[in-house]
Amino acid sequence: MKTIFPTTTDRVAVVTGGAKGVGAQIVRRFAAAGCRVAFSYRSSQDAAARLLSELSRSGAHAIAVRADLSSPDGAARLREAVLGEFGRPHTLVNNAGSSAYKLLCDMTEEETERMLGDNLKSAIYTSRAFYDDFAFGRSGSIINISSVWGLKGASTEAVYSAAKAGVIGFTKALAKELAPCGVRVNAVAPGAIATDMLSCFSEEETEEIRREIPLGRIGMPDDVASAALFLASDLSSYMTGEVLNVSGGYVI
């Protein structure tokens, strides 16, 4: 298999929320770069099966693990499956998440807990599950997928923005904690990306968003995947605690 980033060849990558959208494209790019890939999903079983079939046809070695990473038990289940199939991972991409467009006053307690669990707690629990594997392995890269709303906040997405801002704070703190072990921790903050998260907007609303982006286009999942692959590779070996803004200039 041809590799784009030779320094990733034969490494083990774990991608959470990897069955669809940005996560699925991250899985594809890491597999194409020569990684053995494990990805998690919670409910998208059909999408996970289709992605596994696609990867198998391309000659990639990948597994899919069903796990709810908003709980420590789910994160532990993912780690057990990864170690059993591949051994210690070199890269962890905490991509699992969900969104909701609601006024704060309309958010139920259940919705609030789910938003925090999917977007912030999942990154914390999964990183904690694999913590010793990275720390005692004294190498590796953890990449947390945040959002531009974690940088500037968004009306009708208060809890989501708070969770994604928490991901950035978590990234910076964990980067300091794991740096003495030779482990790098960075984040990617995507802007408007053409995934299911944009499907709730009308064509007119999407066009309005596009006009606000200096580069003049909605981002694609591969834009985020490229940033994640860069942060996983040795090309970024002197970077830790950073947040790559992948928004077409929407946040400058």
Image (cartoon, rainbow, N blue to C red):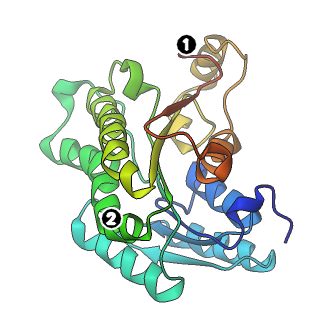
Residue at 72% across, 73% down: 55
Res. 42 in view: no
Q: Is residue 52 depicted above or below 84 in this figure?
A: above
Q: Is residue 80 depicted above or below 210 in this figure?
A: below
Residue 99 image-quadrant placement: top left
Instruction: Looking at this view, name the residue that lies furthest to the front.
Output: 180
* Nearer the observer, 108 or 48: 48
Q: From the image, state whether disc 2 or disc 1 is nearer to you.
A: 2
Amino acid at the residue labelled 1: Ile
Amino acid at the residue labelled 2: Tyr
Marks 2,1: beta carbons within 8 A: no
Q: Is residue 232 depicted above or below 189 in this figure?
A: below
Q: Quadrant of the N terminus?
A: bottom right
Instruction: Looking at this view, name the residue that lies furthest to the left.
Output: 109
| Residue 226 locus on image (x, y percent) | 69, 44
Residue at 37% across, 52% down: 180
| Residue 38 locus on image (x, y percent) | 54, 72
Residue at 33% across, 42% down: 176
Q: Is residue 152 depicted above or below 188 in this figure?
A: above
Residue 70 image-quadrant placement: bottom left
- Which residue is disc 2 drawn over? 131
Q: Residues within 10 Å of mark 2 (few under 14, many from 20)?
A: some
- The numbered mark at residue 252 is 1
| Residue 251 locus on image (x, y percent) | 53, 16
Left or right, residue 213 beside residue 130 = right
Q: Dot 2: what SS?
A: helix
